[in-house]
């Protein structure tokens, strides 16, 4: 059995086609350039731009950030990844993006939304990855690299977060609940 609609830029779960995505070129640009104000997201995006590669956990995190935190259409991110990944494969890329956006084949429901700060703390406690790819934060203590204060952001030139995690999470949950 085939699913040709995914090759036509349609969600696997057809009811999610009605999701009300936001349209913000500024937020998309910040995500693309690694300037969201979320250190792990920014480090991952900067690594992708520099090397054409990104670890799978970071692919999930950045895709979920775009589609859930920013509530931007997953297809924009999918196209961006395909244009930049050296190992880009349509099936893997599309499947990963739809998994992260909760529009694809997924056993877990839409309310799975990774917190970029806790993901960073859990998988890179010393924030070495952030220090490497976000050099403006490299001289901060590890704890601050995960979530710099407003003063640390100002002093290092690192941007303020473009969204508040809790509010963005709730906005995504509300958007998906409207589909029910």
Image (spheres, grey):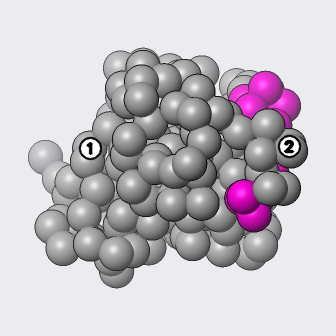
Location of residue 145 with respect to 11 vertically, above or below: above
Tell me: 151 left or right of 88: right
Question: Which numbered disc covers residue 72?
Answer: none
Find disc 1 in the rendering and name its residue: 56
Task: Give the residue displayed 51% in from the left and 60% down from the top.
Answer: 135
Left or right: where 12 falls relative to 74: left
Image height of 169 relative to 90, above or below? above
Mark 2 lies on a secondary structure that is: helix
Residue 120 picture location, percent across and down: 47, 31
Front of the two marks 2 and 1: 2
**Which residue: 43% across, 59% down?**
133
**Mark 1 Cα within 10 Å, few/some/many (few <14, many 20+)?**
few
Please indicate, yes or no, whether residue 23 appears anywhere in the rendered image: yes
The C terminus: image quadrant: top right
Residue drawn at (58%, 27%) of the image: 143
**Magenta stretch, residue numbers:** 156-170
Q: How many labels does the image show?
A: 2
Alpha-carbon span between mark 2 and mark 1:
30 Å
Q: Residues within 10 Å of mark 2 (few under 14, many from 20)?
A: few
As for residue 113 lying within the magenta part, the answer is no
Compare residues 95 and 165 and report the one nearer the observer. Answer: 165
Look at the numbered disc 1 and give the secondary structure of its residue. helix
The percent coordinates of residue 157 (x first, y second) are 75, 63
Instruction: Indicate yes or no whether the magenta region holds residue 165.
Output: yes
Q: Position of residue 102 (x, y in %)?
A: 49, 36
Q: Which residue is disc 2 drawn over?
A: 150
Whether residues under marks 2 and 1 lie with C-beta atoms below 8 angstroms apart, the answer is no
Q: Position of residue 83 (x, y in %)?
A: 34, 80
Which residue is at the front of the view, 110 or 35? 35
Residue at (66% x, 74% y) in the render: 29
Residue 114 visible: no
């Amino acid at each position: 059995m085939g699913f040709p609609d995914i090759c036509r830029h349609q969600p696997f779960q057809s009811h999610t086609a009605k999701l009300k995505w936001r349209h913000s070129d500024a937020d998309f640009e910040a995500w693309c350039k690694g300037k969201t104000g979320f250190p792990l997201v920014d480090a991952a995006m900067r690594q992708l731009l520099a090397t054409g590669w990104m670890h799978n956990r970071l692919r999930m995190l950045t895709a979920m950030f775009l589609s859930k935190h920013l509530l931007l259409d997953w297809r924009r991110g999918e196209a961006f990844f395909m244009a930049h990944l050296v190992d880009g494969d349509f099936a893997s890329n599309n499947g990963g993006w739809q998994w992260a956006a909760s529009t694809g084949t997924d056993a877990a429901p839409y309310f799975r939304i990774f917190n970029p700060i806790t993901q960073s703390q859990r998988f890179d406690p010393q924030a070495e990855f952030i220090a490497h790819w976000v050099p403006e934060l490299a001289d901060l203590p590890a704890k601050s690299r995960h979530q710099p204060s407003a003063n640390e952001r100002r002093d290092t030139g690192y941007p303020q977060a473009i969204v508040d995690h809790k509010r963005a999470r709730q906005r995504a949950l509300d958007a998906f609940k409207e589909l029910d």
